[in-house]
Image: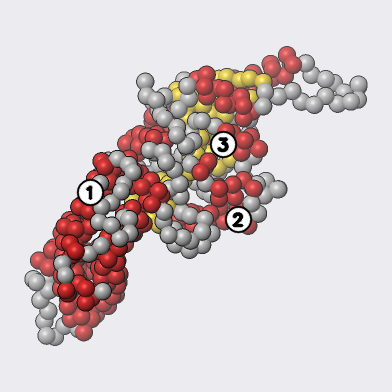
Amino acid sequence: MRTIIIASDFSEASKNAANYAAQLSKITNSTLVVFHAWSIPQVADEPQMYSLTISDIEKSQKAALQNEVNRLEKKWNIKVEGSQSMGFAAEEIERACESFHASFVIMGMRQLSEMGKIFGSVTTAFIHKNKTPTLIIPEKVFFVKPKILLLATDLDTNDDWHELKVLKEFSEIFDMRIHILNVREKKYVTEPAESRAGIRLESELKNTAHSWHFHKDGDVVDVISKTANELKADWMVLIPHRLPWAKQLFHSSVSNQLAFTTARPILFLPEGFVHVED
Amino acid sequence: MLQKIKSRGYEQFSNSELLGIVDKEFHKKIAETLTTLSLNLETAHQLEPYEEELEYAWTNVKAMEELFSEHIQKEEQLLFPVFSNGKKRIRFNGEKRDLGNFIDKLIADHSLLKNQITQIRMVTEQYKCETSATPSHKLAFSLLSELEHDLNKMVFVEEEFLFPRAMKN
């Protein structure tokens, strides 16, 4: 762990995620950066409406950012950096990750919105595009040392699972056990390519405590949710690009999302991500 | 298939025949035995709570059941599909090292299972049962002996024939 970025919009969910990030950075001896992206609000057509200058907006954002930095430093007795930029949040967060060589991004997740979506538009856009592991913290979830981790995968990959190196590092720090849940959208015989991916995964986790679970019947998201509850998983891990059913997390019906309403952080690992150590 | 087993050695079976034997004759049978055993040991322990060996056997059989379930699923879902049908030589387009690591883990599972059943046999003094024992107790101890026999056979077939075939490239 080197640099953790907490992407904040200063909401309660973001502040909760920042608290989580602060404790994680303390234990992993990482640098914590609070990053805020802002955009220019739409100017009203009415001339008598007070219009803010970009300079005013920037000053107010900077003040809010400094407040958040001060809050975290005081509460957790750690050194925190702050950074902000103007632009579309998902893109700016991505740029910040490159600029700070971030190992990790942490974001807050609000309660279900009225439209029934779990993830906001920024989170959705970022997760689909990002090249940095992203840990999403639900609003009411507080930090506990993660001991049990559930990795849901359909084994549909030709890669060597290098993206799991960050998991292995966590596993050493927190003495974690990784539970691998092999899920598939429909029932069929395992293809040799998937089996080989599973064998490579087993080899990659050779020195890490882990167990295998195989999907039987039922909706994929439902199976993952039930398994996570049965195992009392502290974190869920997904490698989203290869998982068409992961789209359900973002666009499906409320009932599906309610079933998946998670009381645990979700770690999204970009496929092929290589964790570079100093 | 039972006729074929009797008429020739395992080394003469094709991959699909060998997998069929492992699946039907060993995996399914042992899994069923473990389930029946666990139920009978639980009943016996409830009826004879003073018999510590029953509690010991029950605890270990439950652990074996969990380990065995994961073990056979790993073999069936991850190892079996890479065997090509009808041919003895396996094509494995990947690191031999990964497959070797995987098989080492499967062998380690075998050792754990064998160790657990050995411990049960020692604690129960070779599955010795008093004549006054309950029917569940007697059945359970009879099943334990059967389980050990089937387990040893499965380990032999897998380690002597199945795994070496998987490693040949």
Quadrant placement of the N terminus of chain A:
top left
Which chain hosts label 2?
A: A
Same chain for mark 3 and mark 2? The answer is: yes
Residue A216 lies in quadrant: bottom left
Same chain for mark 1 and mark 2? The answer is: no
Q: Is residue A102 above or below residue B78?
A: above
Same chain for mark 3 and mark 1? The answer is: no
Residue at disc 2, secondary structure: helix
Q: Evaluate whether residue B49 shows in this view.
A: no
Whether the residues at callouts 1 and 2 have beta carbons within 8 Å, the answer is: no
User: In the rendered structure, which amino acid carries the disc numbered 1?
Assistant: Lys
Which chain hosts label 1?
A: B
Residue at disc 1, secondary structure: loop
Q: Which residue lies under the disc numbered 1?
A: B168
Q: Residue at x 74, y 23 (%)?
A: A40
Q: Evaluate whether residue A171 shows in this view.
A: yes
- Residue B30: x and y, percent? 25, 69
Numbered badge on residue A127 = 3
- Residue B162: x and y, percent? 22, 57
In space, the residues marked 3 and 2 are separated at their CA atoms by: 20 Å
- Residue B153: x and y, percent? 17, 66
Q: Which residue lies under the disc numbered 2?
A: A256
User: In the rendered structure, which amino acid carries the disc numbered 3?
Assistant: Ile
In the image, farthest residue toward the right: A47
A179 left or right of A115 in image: left
